[in-house]
């Protein structure tokens, strides 16, 4: 009888005896589960058309902000030329506009498949498909014209949006990112004072 009680005391006082998880182990498991859940959620959301539209609209807003800052710092005018399926940044060099090609950030952007841009300049529709005839608008010089240089024909390019060294944007614009069949779109707006915003909008 005494031997049995002694064994029981030893069992109770054993410092390494465990019957379940420790608090630290539970915290580690919870953290791992939370991380896996977050990655899974992001992966699911990332495939949604609405999120792809939002991401592209936010990207344009950030790039315009960056181009404005560079325009101020470098003392050079920048511009944006829109297409139905993308856009590109231009820089004024001497007396003409050149496409920015050596900048990995302000490079030409092509939208994901089926996504399109609808652009408004000061509440006026803008044709942004290069395959169509350009608009004749003397106010903002949107016309592409051909000049003969050394016997060859060179096509002049002009931005649809001007990013000035004063930090101003001309003209005011709205660029709507959308996908046919998707109920929502995102609109990037820019005003003359350099203010930019991105808002969700129903089609």
Image (spheres, helix red, strand yellow):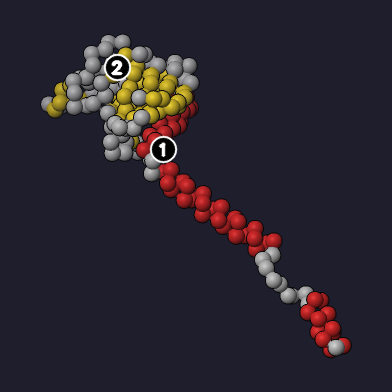
Residue at left 78%, top 79%?
11
Front residue (pair 100, 22):
22
* Disc ID at residue 100: none
- Residue at image mark 2: 125
Which of the two labelled residues, at mark 1 and mark 2, occupies the earlier sequence position?
1
On screen, residue 19 versus residue 136, left or right, reads right
Q: Can residue 155 be seen by looking at this rendering?
A: yes
On screen, residue 146 versus residue 47, left or right, reads left
Q: Taking 15 as reference, is 74 above or below it?
A: above
* Disc ID at residue 51: 1
Q: Secondary structure at mark 1?
A: helix
On screen, residue 50 versus residue 147, left or right, reads right
Across and down, in percent, residue 98 comes to 30, 28
Between marks 1 and 2, how big is the CA–CA gap?
A: 26 Å
Image quadrant occupied by the N terminus: bottom right
Residue at left 60%, top 56%?
30
Front residue (pair 69, 36):
36
Toward the left, the furthest residue is 151
Residue at left 46%, top 46%?
42
Q: Secondary structure at mark 2?
A: strand
Toward the front, the furthest residue is 1
Q: Nearer the viewer, mark 1 or mark 2?
A: 1
């Amino acid at each position: 009888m005494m031997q049995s009680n002694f064994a029981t005391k030893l069992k109770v006082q054993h410092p390494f005896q465990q019957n379940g998880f420790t608090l630290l182990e539970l915290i580690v498991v919870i953290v791992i589960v939370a991380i896996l859940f977050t990655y899974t959620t992001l992966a699911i959301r990332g495939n949604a058309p609405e999120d792809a539209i939002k991401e592209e609209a936010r990207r344009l807003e950030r790039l315009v902000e960056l181009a404005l800052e560079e325009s101020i710092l470098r003392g050079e005018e920048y511009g944006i030329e829109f297409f139905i399926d993308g856009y590109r940044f231009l820089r004024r060099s001497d007396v003409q506009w050149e496409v920015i090609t050596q900048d990995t950030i302000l490079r030409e952007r092509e939208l994901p498949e089926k996504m399109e841009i609808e652009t408004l300049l000061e509440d006026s529709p803008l044709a942004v498909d290069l395959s169509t005839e350009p608009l004749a608008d003397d106010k903002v010089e949107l016309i592409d014209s051909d000049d003969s240089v050394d016997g060859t024909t060179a096509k002049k390019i002009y931005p649809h949006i001007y990013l000035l060294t004063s930090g101003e944007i001309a003209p005011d614009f709205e660029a709507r990112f959308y996908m046919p069949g998707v109920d929502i779109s995102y609109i990037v707006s820019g005003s003359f004072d350099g203010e930019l915003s991105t808002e969700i909008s129903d089609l």
